[in-house]
Image: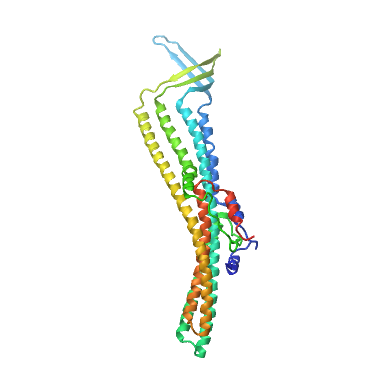
């Protein structure tokens, strides 16, 4: 499809280089500038600290304390006239090390920290997949808007030519005023549609600018007559099975379920004793006329056994068990959603390819119909409205064909995302279908 006029309009909206940007370039710009992806990257960095925080509960805890006190002492004895008064300063410090030997909840928290770090990685991969889809959707939305504008502009130009022809024919008496009014009506309608298409193109470009942080350059379009390939493997059941196991959403929910299982274990560990190695070294000084200094070093085992905590431990355990059941249900829902997404995307690809083939045939027949109606109008066997209808049908066919191609390519990306295999190589594969 000729998109020269649409690209010309798009060029008026940009101030950068006239060179066309392709999908890969736009994707890399989005990697560097998209705010949502930047937030996901920060979330990943935060999630990577979970394993460090969990490991801290297994490592020694060392603390240092110090004190200084001014003492003013006055001692009086009953029946004894003399008193004893003394003022002095006392100070000291202590150093304590506690090494957990058996704290089961700390071990469970460490394993949860590993799972939470893995969950942060899975969520970041989901954000990366989401970015690929958002970039492709925004990119093709711009191309689709450009194609729609080009088709409507061609329709307005053709309607203008037909209007002039109808006016000339009316002046010589070969057509009625009705033909002139019909041509004027179609011309006015095409002008209104062109304004709407220009607005839609501007909106689409601003949506793309939101991803890359600046006004986009003119974009490279699909090559004319590009062939779309069926997904491999060419089996919907295989894609559904892959989605149920490999979808990043399913993988993330499996990690959430594992964390919930360990939440139950950690809550029940509140009934278990704890055993620690405790070592300390302390010094106390009393600064009087004759200074006293006490220095104590100790090391030993310390065991604590919870007996009753008001029912809190049992309540937390029941809460964790209920949340685990919710995680099981969420995991099943994620699997079903992934399977549904795979089926929808598969059907989107296969039906989209069939629709493209049908619309390509319709484009040829609509072009032939327009040519035939123009010739019939010239020789007097067709009326003006027939030509106008043929022009409108061709414009509609061109728009539908462009939309079908873009939707089919997007369905291919969504199918890969449903199976958890969408990557930069898929962006490169679609990028190879664009005009150089």
> Taking 108 as reference, is 221 left or right?
right
> Taking 91 as reference, is 309 left or right?
left
Between 283 and 433, the one nearer to me in the picture: 433
The residue located at (46%, 24%) in the rendering is 103
Inspect this view and state whether residue 199 appears. Answer: no
**Total tally of numbered discs in the picture:** 0
Q: Quadrant of the C terminus?
A: bottom right
Q: Quadrant of residue 432?
A: bottom right
Residue 4 at x, y = what percent? Answer: 60, 68
The residue located at (55%, 40%) in the rendering is 45
The residue located at (45%, 53%) in the rendering is 344
Residue 368 at x, y = what percent? Answer: 53, 74
Is 418 drawn above or below residue 206 in the view shown? above
Residue 247 at x, y = what percent? Answer: 49, 45
Is 324 drawn above or below residue 391 in the view shown? above
Q: Quadrant of the N terminus?
A: bottom right
Residue 394 at x, y = what percent? Answer: 51, 71
Inspect this view and state whether residue 138 appears. Answer: yes
The residue located at (53%, 70%) in the rendering is 364
């Amino acid at each position: 499809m000729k998109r020269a006029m649409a690209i010309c309009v798009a060029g008026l909206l940009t101030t950068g280089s006239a060179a066309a940007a392709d999908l890969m370039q736009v994707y890399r710009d989005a990697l560097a500038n998209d705010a949502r992806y930047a937030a996901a990257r920060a979330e990943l960095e935060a999630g990577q600290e979970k394993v460090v925080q969990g490991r801290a509960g297994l490592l020694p805890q060392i603390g240092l304390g110090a004190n200084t006190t001014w003492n003013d002492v006055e001692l009086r004895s009953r029946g004894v006239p003399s008193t004893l008064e003394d003022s002095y300063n006392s100070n000291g410090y202590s150093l304590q090390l506690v090494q957990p030997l058996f704290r089961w909840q700390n071990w469970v928290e460490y394993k949860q920290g590993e799972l939470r770090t893995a969950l942060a990685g899975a969520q970041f991969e989901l954000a990366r997949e989401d970015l690929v889809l958002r970039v492709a959707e925004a990119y093709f939305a711009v191309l689709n808007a450009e194609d729609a504008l080009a088709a409507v502009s061609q329709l307005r130009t053709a309607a203008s030519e037909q209007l002039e022809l109808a006016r000339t024919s009316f002046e010589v008496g070969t057509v009625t005023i009705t033909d002139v009014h019909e041509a004027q009506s179609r011309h006015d309608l095409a002008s209104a549609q062109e304004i709407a298409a220009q607005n839609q193109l501007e909106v689409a470009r601003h949506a793309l600018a939101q991803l890359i942080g600046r006004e986009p350059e003119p974009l490279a379009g699909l090559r004319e007559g590009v062939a779309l390939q069926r997904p491999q493997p060419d089996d919907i059941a295989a894609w559904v099975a892959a989605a149920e196991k490999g979808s990043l959403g399913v993988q993330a929910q499996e990690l959430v379920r594992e964390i919930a299982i360990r939440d139950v274990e950690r809550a029940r560990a509140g009934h278990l004793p704890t055993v620690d190695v405790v070592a300390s070294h302390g010094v106390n000084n009393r600064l009087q006329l004759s200074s006293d200094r006490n220095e104590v070093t100790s090391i030993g085992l310390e065991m604590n056994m919870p007996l009753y905590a008001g029912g809190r431990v049992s309540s937390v355990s029941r809460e964790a068990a209920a949340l685990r059941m919710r995680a099981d249900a969420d995991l099943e829902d994620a699997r079903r959603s992934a399977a549904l997404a795979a089926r929808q995307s598969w059907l989107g690809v296969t039906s989209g390819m069939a629709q493209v083939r049908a619309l390509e045939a319709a484009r040829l027949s609509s072009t032939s119909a327009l040519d035939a109606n123009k010739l019939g109008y010239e020789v007097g066997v067709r009326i003006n409205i027939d030509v106008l209808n043929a022009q409108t049908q061709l414009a509609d066919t061109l728009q539908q064909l462009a939309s079908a191609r873009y939707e089919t390519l997007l369905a291919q990306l969504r199918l890969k995302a449903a199976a958890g295999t969408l990557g930069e190589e898929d962006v490169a594969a679609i990028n190879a279908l664009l005009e150089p």
